[in-house]
Image: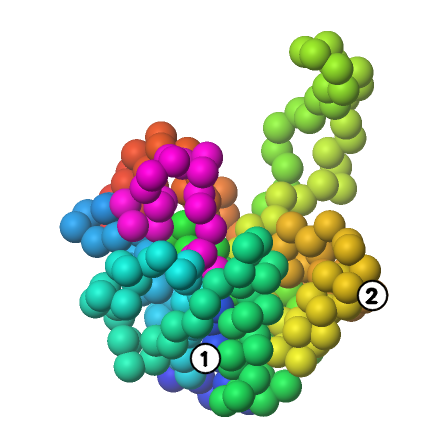
Amino acid sequence: MSHLSQQIPRKLWVILPAAGSGSRFSKTELKQYQTLQQRTVLEHTVARLNQLPLTGYVLAIGTQDNIAKTLPFSDLEKAHFCLGGAERVNSVLNALNYLSAMASEDDWIMVHDAARPCVSLDCLQQLVNTAIAQDRAAILAIPVRDTLKRVVTGSDIEETVDRSMLWQAQTPQMAKLGTLKRAIEQALQDGANITDEASALEHIGEQVSVVQGRSDNIKITYPDDLELAKLILQAQA
């Protein structure tokens, strides 16, 4: 890992928005606290990210969350906690505000979904290297591989959508602290539809690079995704 440490001229932090209700997964259980191989999804996710030379990581958690602070995360001394918000974007902004007290505007921030425990070290390194080499924001994404259909009413296909230029965004998404904070604040002020960090950066005209990730970097959204994640972690091991 030492060669990567030398390549990072500024500090590298991770933000994990983990305050969502995850209602598509379950009305009562949070997906990040489901168990995979004797560890919670969130512990797996944090362990993956800690393979990078992080200065620290911030978990933005809900007010009712009494689990996160009890978990034995890897590199626990680097863990920080802040209150999440109503939406993912609010949680990320809260974490950026929290970090502003200890980090520089030029420090690099990676935002990663709490429920993506299968991201590979190779992809993480490529993302970091690309953002630093190009000195601009970057995200992991994969080219859309299936034929896409536009369905407007009922179940009738209206047209087939050209997928040749379409990419499916993943996380982590990486940018400088000051730039990302400014982008999110502006986007919220303008009432823009912000579904990920890149969409906020795009809103203020910042260039964002895509770094080709892997299809096994799945986000656990539905209960059967948990079974798939178990298989992926086994295969990766």
Q: If you read the primary sequence from the N terminus, does the residue marked by circle 1 or circle 2 appear first?
A: 1
Q: Secondary structure at mark 2?
A: loop
Mark 1 lies on residue: 4
Q: Could you say which is closer to the camera, residue 230 or residue 61?
A: 61
Q: Amino acid at mark 2?
A: Gly
Q: Position of residue 104 (x, y in %)?
A: 58, 89
Question: Closer to the camera, 164 or 176?
Answer: 176
Which is more toward the observer, 117 or 131?
117
Query: Where 10 sits versus 220, above or below?
Result: below
> Which class describes the residues within 10 Å of circle 2: few (<14), some (14-19), or many (20+)?
few
Please identify the residue farthest to the left as the structure is shown: 38
Mark 1 residue type: Leu
Distance from Cα at disc 1 to Cα at disc 2: 29 Å
Residue drawn at the location 71% of the way across and 69% of the way down: 185
Q: Is residue 32 magenta?
A: yes
Query: Magenta segment, which residues?
Result: 17-34
Q: Is residue 47 magenta?
A: no
Residue at image coords 77%, 27%: 161
- Measured as percent of width and height from the top left, residue 39 is found at 21, 53
Main secondary structure type of the part rendered in magenta: loop
